[in-house]
C-alpha cells in the first residue's frame, strides 16, 4: 500500500503517531494535530500560544502551515518568528483565495 493511500487528508497513520509518542511529554495529547500544533509553537518560540497553533493545525491545510513554517526557518535575523509565521500564513491564504475566486470581467 502506498504512502498516499495510508494518509487521509494529510493526517499521519496511527502507527506513525504511536512511534513518535512520548508518554511523559505527550500525556495530554490525543490527536496528531495537537502534537503538530505543540511542536510548531515550540519551534517558533511561542509556548504561551500553543492553543492557537493547535487550532491552526486542526483547521488549516497542512501544506500552508508547512510552507509558512519553512519560510520562517529560512528567514535570516528575524525579530519575531511567530509574527513572521502568521504574516506569511495570511499571505498564503490570500493567494489561495484569489486563485479559487474567478475574476469578473467587465463588459466593454
Image (spheres, rainbow, N blue to C red):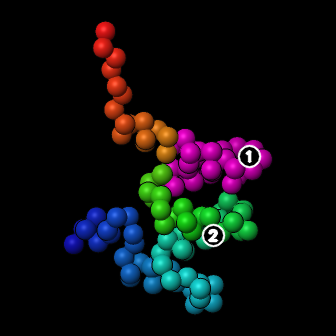
Q: Residues within 10 Å of mark 2 (few under 14, many from 20)?
A: some
Q: Determine the residue positioned at 36% across, 40% down.
A: 100
Q: Residues within 10 Å of mark 1 (few under 14, many from 20)?
A: few
Please tell me whether the stretch drawn in magenta is mainly helix, strand or loop: helix
| Left or right position of 90 against 107 | right
Q: What range is drawn magenta here?
A: 65-92
Q: Helix, strand, or loop for circle 2?
A: helix
Quarter location, residue 12: bottom left
Q: Determine the residue positioned at 38% across, 81% down.
A: 14
Decide: is 106 above or below 79. above
Q: Determine the residue positioned at 57% across, 68% down.
A: 54
Q: Residue furthest right?
A: 79
Mark 2–mark 1 distance (CA, rounded to whole Å) = 23 Å
Residue 93: percent from left, percent from top: 49, 45
Q: Earlier in the sequence, mark 2 or mark 1?
A: 2
Tag 2 residue:
51
Decide: is 70 above or below 95. below
Residue 70 on the magenta segment: yes
Residue 53 on the magenta segment: no
Tag 1 residue:
78
Give the label, 2 or 1, closer to the camera: 2
Amino acid at each position: 500500500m502506498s504512502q498516499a493511500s495510508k494518509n487521509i487528508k494529510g493526517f499521519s497513520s496511527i502507527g506513525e503517531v504511536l512511534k513518535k509518542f512520548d508518554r511523559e511529554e505527550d500525556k495530554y495529547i490525543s490527536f496528531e494535530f495537537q502534537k503538530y500544533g505543540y511542536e510548531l509553537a515550540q519551534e517558533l518560540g511561542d509556548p504561551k500560544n500553543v492553543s492557537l497553533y493547535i487550532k491552526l493545525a486542526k483547521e488549516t491545510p497542512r501544506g500552508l502551515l508547512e510552507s509558512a513554517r519553512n519560510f520562517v526557518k529560512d528567514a535570516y535575523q528575524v525579530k519575531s518568528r511567530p509574527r513572521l509565521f502568521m504574516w506569511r500564513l495570511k499571505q498564503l491564504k490570500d493567494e489561495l483565495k484569489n486563485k479559487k475566486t474567478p475574476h469578473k470581467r467587465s463588459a466593454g
